[in-house]
Amino acid sequence: MRQTADLICHGGVISTLDPAQPAAEGAAVRNGRFSLVGKTSEVMLLAGKDTRVIDLKGRRVLPGLIDNHLHIIRGGLNFNMELRWDGVRSLDEALGMLKRQVAITPPPQWVRVVGGFTEHQFAEKRLPTIEELNTIAPDTPVFILHLYDRALLNGAALRAVGYIKSTPPPIGGEIVRDGAGNPTGLLLAKPNAAILYATLAKGPKLPFDYQLNSTRHFLRELNRLGVTGAIDAGGGFQNYPEDYAVIQKLADEGELTIRLAYNLFTQKPKGEKEDFLNWTRSSKYKQGDEYFRHNGGGEMLVFSAADFEDFRQPRPDMPPEMETELEGVVRILAENRWPWRLHATYDETIRRALDVFEKVHRDVPVNGLHWFIDHAETISDRSIDRIIQLGGGIAIQHRMAYQGEYFVERYGAVAAESTPPIAKIIERGGKISAGTDATRVASYNPWVALAWLVTGKTVGGLNLYPRRNCLDRETALRLWTEHVTWFSNEQGNKGRIAVGQLADLIVPSRDFFACPEDEISGITSDLTLVGGRPVFAANDFRQYDPPLPAAMPDWSPVRIFGGYGAWGATTKQFSAHAAKPLGCTNHRHRVGTSNARADLEHLWGASGCLCWAI
């Protein structure tokens, strides 16, 4: 006799990605896994008196999305402090958001716009000027990070960080100065982003309890977009174990709503080997559980191998000590059977790294370790074949969707047609998956990345790729689901809607397989389940939406603007009105048109919320 289900979803159009059963109408869940996938009549046989039953209302259902490269831990610590311009379509609108945030941000706090956008997405096709920032915020520090190429600081921010005429020039970057030698407020990566990172790190941080709250809101934002899993790639100024305490606490208390595999990223130029020796003694590969688990080393293994992807600058040559330093770390990882990931933008860097991997492999076999190269924009056919022969993989992200215009300007449109050569990697049998590299160099929105894979267009509308380097929708979806599981050594455990796999699924707001191509990037999720538990719900499924505490602090941009596209989706509703936040944290107390209220409930219903008077 079959056991009754904890949850049943029925009456949908389920794309399972399971070759043995590509389509289904319903799925039953028990103990966090799919126990039956099939027709509605079949799964309803498992309904008991305590079974939660969700009518899918004929909607398309997909496996939950998994990001192969997301700086989720660092992003969560800071999410509530950041004004996000992700998806904003005009600079005028972006500056309006900035002005409004400046008005409510108390000293000594900063207003920060930290990546996730490009000037090419704006109708004006430009960044704000320093003069515009100073006019909007004469006294409040404003820091704006654009990709990894530059940062804009207003006068108050320059004063806060202490950059003056006598400040020495940074290594690998530039503090742009006026004719008298005074900093103008423009910082440039030339070619690395160290000066951008270091300057941002000077800003105030949230206290621990606020970081907990901030991380929960970031996880919720990702759930709103259909993300149920990710591989965290570490990041600059993300120290282990100190900066992992928040995510560890959420994991210990069962409050993670995204399954997270994390890599350890060294912070010590010339001290990388010591880091990995210590970590392999104190940490165990795959330690943790299905929600939070260790995934090896990287993406920074040694600083001498990091070729930053600023296409506004010439390609950097890695120093001669790269091979020696990289070999020392890779030998430690291989001997301890730890996988690794390596940031590498250019084939010139990849070739040199593969020389090292092959050398280590002759003494300590590395095939079977699930190691991989990240980014690989200009990877060659020969390097693809070498990676395949050595048992590695290639993790690509949609950085070209944000930087494609700069690449074309430097290298030409023909070179950009296969940057990266996604279709060719698949044709040659390479292990490949997709992600975002969010939150700073690109947005965390997975649908923007999927649209890039399918259409070959940048967020600014430039048609980068011919059809031969674009993917059909099913292939693109597989790169965002089942293919990612090889990169975290979890094949067969998730990524499909199939019996025995973890019960992670989404109901997209539009039918991914039927909507026009230009609507893909605007998709969100109307229902997101992780382990059969609703973690986000809206519109037809709103009654299943779990509560979330108000965003902290009370001046958080999340309270006013929400996440990706949220502000832009609602400003149209209010364009003829003066909307005034009254500070109420009860999201059901709103006044206005029914459509406006419904949209706000959807976008901010569990985000701390505001009470609006129109």
Image (cartoon, rainbow, N blue to C red):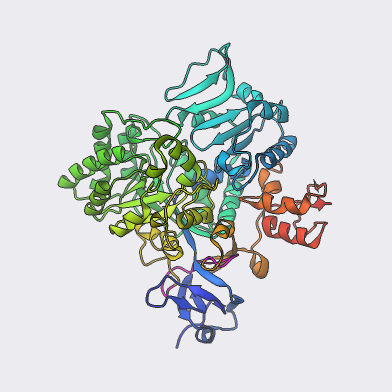
Could you tell whether 497 is left or right of 519 in the image? Answer: left
Check if residue 479 falls in the magenta segment.
no
Between 103 and 576, the residue placed more toward the observer is: 576
Spot occupied by residue 610 in the image (x, y as percentages of width and height): 75, 51
Q: Residue at x 54, y 68 (%)?
A: 514
Residue 201 in view in this figure: no
Q: Residue at x 71, y 26 (%)?
A: 139
Q: Give the percent coordinates (x, y) of residue 227.
A: 52, 58
How far from the left and from the top, in percent, is residue 614?
84, 51
* Residue 108 in view of the camera: yes
What is the x, y in percent for residue 600?
72, 56
Locate residue 138 relative to residue 404 in the image: left or right. Answer: right
Camera-side residue: 280 or 465? 465
In the rendered image of this protein, does residue 16 appear above or below residue 40?
Answer: above
**Which residue lies most toward the top here?**
180
Number of marks: 0
Q: Residue shown at 47%/43% (left/top)?
A: 404
Which portion, as a residue range, is magenta?
A: 498-512
User: Which quarter of the figure is the N terminus placed in?
Assistant: bottom left
